[in-house]
Amino acid sequence: MSRVLSEIDTTSGVARSFSQDSDSTMIAKRAAMASATGTAVEYYEFSIYGYMATIIAPLFFPSGNSTAALLATLAVFGIAFVVRPIGGIVLGRLADRFGRRNVLLSTVIGMGLATALIGVLPTAAQIGIAAPILLVLLRLCQGFFAGGEVVGAAAFVAESSPNGRRGFFGAFTPVGVAIGGATGAIVCGVTTGLLDAEQLQNWGWRIPFFLSIPLVVFSFYMRHNVEETPEFRAFLAKDKPPVAPIREVFSLDLPSLLRVIVFAFAQNAGYFIGMVFMNIYLTTYLHFEKTKVYWLIAVISLCMAAMMPFWGGLSDRIGRKKALTIGFVGYVVLVVPMMLLMGSGSFWIAALAMFIATLPMPVVQSVGYPTYAEQFPTRVRYTAMAISINVGAILGGGLTPYVVTSLIGSTSNLLWPGYFMGGAALLALIALTTLRDTSKGDLRR
């Protein structure tokens, strides 16, 4: 009799375990999809400004010098990054005190409204100096809400994923990054392909900004249907939210904060050089047709997105440190030689070279976000990630296109983007030597 009861208990225990595993996997899937859609909207909205920079430049910064106008447009691109840490800190504090879900809903709405309003801005020819001022203000709004978007998405997925699978599910946050960039490139490619230069200057450039509205509605719907993360609920059940999360981060987690800043710097440099700046590089400096370049970026972005779940899942098995090492070494070895090939004059050789140069991107993007989330405890995770990732984004994303464009303009050396990317990757490899692998076990609470 006791043996039968023991077998029944064992069977019911297995059934409960299976049910719990199934529930946790379903929660992780919903979180991954909701995070990916919101991140896709963010990077669609950020990327279309970069993709349309050469068209927007003379409309808001008219001058006789096309390089000066482009630099001014890229400076506005970078301004949005400067305010990202402020948005991240404000939104992070709210998320660490009141939960992740509502903050992630607000970031999608705020980002989308700012982007759509750029599409209705009058140009400098219509209202003079007020045009670039309004453009700057809207980019600042974008940056504020973006400061809490991808950060929150990464934290949300990590806190919703079962142990041993955070890399796989966490990879869907950068999948959203790649899909957002690809969607932006497709929309810009179709727009520039269907309209002539005069139509683009008059009204066509506005279309990609207007199209952010349906994307925001879809993303809001996806996020509205997910619950708060299990990790945050478990934390609230036995502890109180931090009163001063910023002070706590700097006093208790400064080494992790600095480490993530370096990783995020290299990660963002890889994305914004590889996808946003390369559009300018291929069209302005190598003189390839804009529409072809947009489609090339779209195809490469989708290919990169398809690779990310593999690399995220692999990092669950071999560890985050080994996977990130593969990615950053790839940047050091591949980027400069592939840029030399891009200058051959053949579009198809340039396309192949760009594809090879971006192969490290899915590794670093997919493994980076779950790694960042694992460095900080639940009580201040959102705030800590907001500070570190956004500072890294300023250095690697906001300043990079402007800096490399300036260096090319002053030296006429077209390889500066590759040198910059290689240097950023080397710094990340040095920082990796101090990383303790976090792919196994529970998140810090």
Image (cartoon, helix red, strand yellow):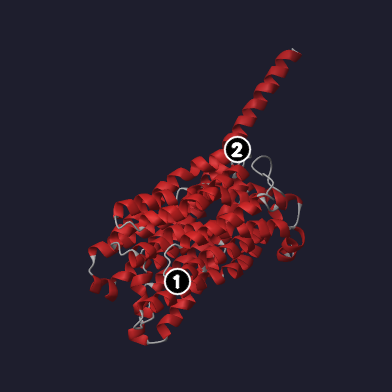
Find residue 422 and report its horizontal and vertical position in percent. 53, 57
**Other-residue count near label 1 (Cα within 10 Å), few / some / many at <14 / 14–19 / ≥20:** few
Q: Is residue 146 above or below residue 350?
A: below
Q: Secondary structure at mark 2?
A: helix
Position of residue 415 in the picture relative to residue 103 (left or right): left
Report how many numbered discs are placed on residues in the image. Answer: 2
Q: Is residue 236 above or below residue 42?
A: above
| Residue at far bottom of view | 128
Q: Secondary structure at mark 1?
A: helix
Q: Is residue 89 above or below residue 153?
A: below
Which mark is on residue 377? Answer: none
Position of residue 261 in the picture relative to residue 422 (left or right): right
Marked residue nearer the N-terminal end (1 or 2): 2
Residue at screen point 36% across, 49% down: 352
Find residue 365 and report its horizontal and vertical position in percent. 52, 51
Q: Is any part of residue 100 visible from this angle?
A: no
Q: In which quadrant of the rendered image does the N terminus lie?
A: top right
Q: Is residue 47 above or below residue 24?
A: below
The residues bearing labels 1 and 2 have C-alpha atoms spaced at a distance of 43 Å
Residue at screen point 69% across, 46% down: 436
Residue at screen point 56% across, 47% down: 367
Depth check: give the residue in front, 164 or 434.
434
Find residue 148 and report its horizontal and vertical position in percent. 57, 62
- State the residue position of label 2: 318
Q: Is any part of residue 183 visible from this angle?
A: yes
Q: Quadrant of residue 117?
A: bottom left
Residue at screen point 63% across, 63% down: 387
Q: Nearer the viewer, mark 1 or mark 2?
A: 1
Residue type (three-letter) at the residue carrying disc 1: Thr
- State the residue position of label 1: 411
